[in-house]
């Protein structure tokens, strides 16, 4: 059975060339599918690797998105 791979908010931010605050905002808006790494409310947010790849592929290269 293949294990699902994840990235953290910080890793996605670095790979996408955006700040972690932008990634958190997009998660809050429901633009990024995510999961929690545990059951506690304060557990770490993780993003499936295929979702991270989708986000990166949809971003315009060389541009900064101010308003989503």
Image (spheres, rainbow, N blue to C red):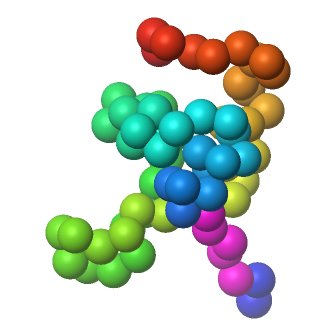
Q: Per the image, is 16 magenta?
A: no
Q: Looking at the image, which is closer to me, 5 or 61?
A: 61
Q: Quadrant of residue 38?
A: bottom left
Q: Main secondary structure of the magenta part?
A: loop
At a point 49% along the width and 63% down the height, the residue shown is: 46
Where's residue 13, x and y in %?
A: 59, 45
User: In the displayed image of the protein, which residue is found farthest to the left?
Assistant: 41
Q: Quadrant of residue 10?
A: bottom right
| Whether residue 12 is situated above or below residue 29 in the rendered picture | below
Q: Quadrant of residue 28?
A: top left
At a point 59% along the width and 34% down the height, the residue shown is: 18
| Whether residue 8 is situated above or below residue 57 in the rendered picture | below
Q: Which residues are the magenta region?
A: 3-7
Q: Quadrant of the N terminus?
A: bottom right
At a point 37% along the width and 33% down the height, the residue shown is: 25
At a point 79% along the width and 18% down the height, the residue shown is: 62
| Whether residue 17 is situated above or below residue 49 in the rendered picture | above
**How many numbered discs sit on the rendered protein?**
0
Q: Is residue 64 shown left or right of residue 46?
A: right
* Residue 51 in view of the camera: no
Where's residue 17, x and y in %?
A: 68, 36
Q: Looking at the image, which is closer to me, 47 or 22?
A: 22
Where's residue 60, x and y in %?
A: 76, 17
Q: Looking at the image, which is closer to me, 6 or 4?
A: 6
User: In the displayed image of the protein, which residue is found farthest to the top?
Assistant: 67
* Residue 56 in view of the camera: yes
| Whether residue 4 is situated above or below residue 28 in the rendered picture | below
């Amino acid at each position: 059975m293949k294990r699902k791979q994840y990235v953290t908010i910080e890793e996605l931010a670095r790979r996408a060339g955006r700040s972690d605050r932008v990634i958190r905002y997009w998660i809050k808006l429901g633009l990024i599918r995510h999961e929690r790494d545990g059951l506690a409310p304060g557990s770490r947010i993780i993003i499936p690797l295929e979702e991270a790849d989708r986000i990166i592929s949809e971003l315009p290269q060389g541009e900064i998105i101010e308003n989503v």
